[in-house]
Image (cartoon, helix red, strand yellow):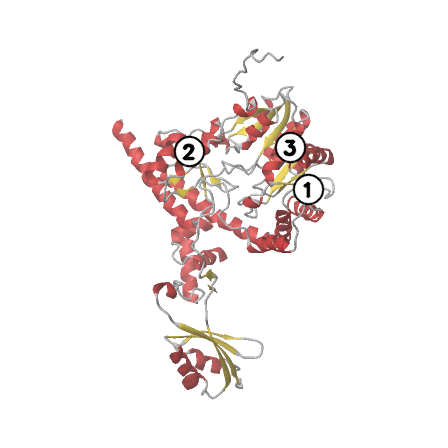
Amino acid sequence: MKEIFEILEQNARATTEQISTMVDKPVSEVERIIKQAEKDGAILKYKAIINWTKLGEGDIWALIEVRVTPQRGVGFDAIAERIYQFPEVYSAYLVSGTYDLAILVKGKNMQEISSFVTEKLAPLERVQSTVTHFLLKRYKENGETFHLPKEINKRLPITP
Amino acid sequence: MLNIKSAPIQARDNLISQKVDSLPPSGIRKFFDLLSFMEDVISLGIGEPDFVTPWHIREAGTYSLGKGYTMYTSNSGMLELRQELTNYLELHYGVSYHPEHEILITVGSSEGLDLAMRAIINTGDEVIIPDPCYVAYSANIILAGGVPIPIPTSAENNFVIEATEIEARITKQTKAILIGYPANPTGAVMSKSECSAIAELAKKYNLLVISDEIYARLVYGVEHICFPSLPGMKERTILIGGFSKSHAMTGWRIGYVAAEGRFIQALTKIHQYTMLCAPTMAQMAAIEALRNGESEVEKMVQEYNRRRRLMVKRLNEIGLSCFEPKGAFYAFPSIKATGMNSEEFAERLLIEEKVAVVPGPAFGPCGEGFVRCCYATSLPNIEEALGRISRFVSKHKKVQYQMR
């Protein structure tokens, strides 16, 4: 069953028929498993990984370290939720180490990100401090590599 | 005074050895030449993994260069590698070899095969091989002075060589049986009972078995039977293996031979005068492959299996009936429904639809009526290629119908 999801994770556009052949299970069963996973939220969404730079779109990204004060009863969850609800926040994680929340923020330009930090994030009541790292280059994301030299076929066309 | 006028020098026409001269060129060559002038071809004719060697193995190779491991190793190969290898063979197949005198590291399994043939064959000795089989088998036997005795196999028997068929062709000259399962080009595997039957023959007629198990790790839903693991077989089997297919390391040229000391000694004699040793960098990489490569191997096998199911199902749907290959990364469908022979099919498919497959007869006469399709290529490529093959087949089936 895990294999079905591995295939989808690699290629969200694989059809139920293809998956059924690949894992050697009836189409109806594959369909049922996928539907169930969609219902349970095990499959959250089907998305494409876009290399925006290729399209000439230049979003600015920043990785922000946030130190916060946890709250009685809800720990970090309440403040995390207040932060990740902002549409600017692309990803948010609670992490171990010298800070608490690691968030990835997307903006049209540097101004947009800095105003998010100074006007929205930093003034939040339980936020103690923030450290903003602007992303300079993306090498790999979600297991996919960017900036690879054009793939050349290294194999000979016919080999014994 | 010298008599210069005497006996004019005849133009020599025998500069190439007769043995080599009469050796037919590989049937694959022709398609290679055709292909090199074409663009946008999807090739199902490649006999190697499409995966690049796993990064940790490549890294070990570059690290060894950085560290300056650029000298010869012992003829037999690095002891560390031989030790890892004996552990590996014990773990996966339950066969025990002594790392010091029962293992030889070779330049790919191809070298191992050549060495084995040269080490055991006296001129005129007969070596039994399956038909169809890997292209190099009969060439290696002939070059070593032997006579290949092909045993016909067929789709009805899943292209497995049968003991009764072998027995019927055993003569006083028969020296050995050379088998390679999982098989190139058919993807066939041998069951334990099929292996045992051959083992019994080997004992009965005092024959050697050369077992080319380069595809041993690529089996799907069945257990690979390592030939020397059968009772009484270690002492009469020369096991040939390598890293090319299991660890996607074709270009590194690294393989091995495992057998009893007297055989390894004989093979090593030739190896020391011809190769000296396998590339040091490749040996270092192979150590890493054996130590930490397992999860990558499993990942690749799983991926091949998915592609295999897709390809076999589609081929059958298209009308090219295909028995289920349980090993290697080849499907070997029958193309008889098109009314063409293998060569014609492959050539027209290449020209009309730009898909390359290898005609079965390249691997022996019993390959007639079949083509080899390799599924070690990306899923989109497989889908696209099968779409083109489907179009090709329905077009030509129709033509046949209209002609009737």
Viewer-side residue, B125 vs A126:
B125
Q: Which mark is residue B95?
A: 1
Residue tagged 2: B334
Q: Secondary structure at mark 1?
A: loop
Q: Nearer the viewer, mark 1 or mark 3?
A: 3
> Could you tell me if the residues under marks 2 and 3 are in contact, i.e. CB atoms within 8 Å?
no
Q: Most extreme residue toward the front, as rendered? A: B1
Q: Amino acid at mark 3?
A: Ala
Per the rendering, the mark at residue B32 is none
Q: CA distance from mark 2 to mark 3?
A: 33 Å
Q: Which residue is mark 3?
A: B116
Mark 2 or 3: the one toward you: 3
Quarter of the image with the N terminus of chain B in it: top right
Furthest residue in direction left, as rendered: B402
Query: Nearer the N terminus, badge 2 or badge 3?
Result: 3
Vertical order, B20 against B218 (above or below) = above
Looking at the rendered structure, the kind of residue marked 1 is: Val
Number of marks in the rendered image:
3
Q: Residue at x 52, y 41 (%)?
A: B328
Q: Chain of mark 2?
A: B
Cα distance between the residues tagged 1 and 3: 19 Å
Disc 1, disc 3: CB below 8 Å?
no
Q: Earlier in the sequence, mark 1 or mark 3?
A: 1
Residue type, mark 2 in image: Ser
Residue B393: quarter of image:
top left
Q: Establish whether labels 1 and 3 are both on one chain.
A: yes
